[in-house]
Amino acid sequence: MAIEYRGEKFSGYNKPKRTPKHPGKSHAVLAKEGSKVKLIRFGQQGVTTAGKPKEGESAKQKARRASFKARHAKNIKKGKMSAAYWADKVKW
């Protein structure tokens, strides 16, 4: 079920994808909550984030993850219609 929105193809609603050719943002998602649909771009292009937690993760990576979550906690709580929610879910 491919969805085309503003000339961009998505595999479905609330399914993030990489955007390697976008000049600034690394990911995009077609977010849907109820009847509201919104294109959200998130994540800085070319930046290595902490990724998923790994066993034996360095203290520096743990600190980066904790800092991101603390700094954006208010925006992450806004839910699916915020870029911070998707960055937290996909990149951190």
Image: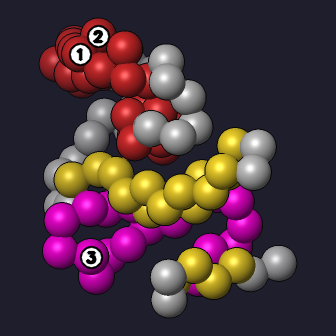
**Cα distance in 3D space between marks 2 and 1:** 4 Å
Q: Main secondary structure of the magenta part?
A: loop
Q: Position of residue 55 (x, y in %)?
A: 46, 21
Amino acid of disc 3: His
Q: Residue at x 49, y 18 (%)?
A: 77
**Cα distance in 3D space between marks 2 and 3:** 27 Å
For the C terminus, which image quadrant? top left
Q: Secondary structure at mark 1?
A: helix
Decide whether residue 18 is among the magenta residues. Answer: yes
Q: Position of residue 80 (x, y in %)?
A: 58, 37
Q: Which mark is residue 70?
A: 2
Query: Residue pushed farthest bottom?
Result: 7
Q: Which mark is residue 51?
A: none
Q: Which residue is mark 3?
A: 22
Confirm whether residue 33 shows in the render: yes
Give the magenta range: 9-27
User: Is residue 64 depicted above or below 4 in this figure?
Assistant: above
For the N terminus, which image quadrant? bottom right
Q: Secondary structure at mark 2?
A: helix
User: Is residue 65 depicted above or below 19 in this figure?
Assistant: above
Q: Which residue is mark 1?
A: 71
Q: Nearer the viewer, residue 31 or 63?
A: 31
Q: Position of residue 74 (x, y in %)?
A: 37, 14
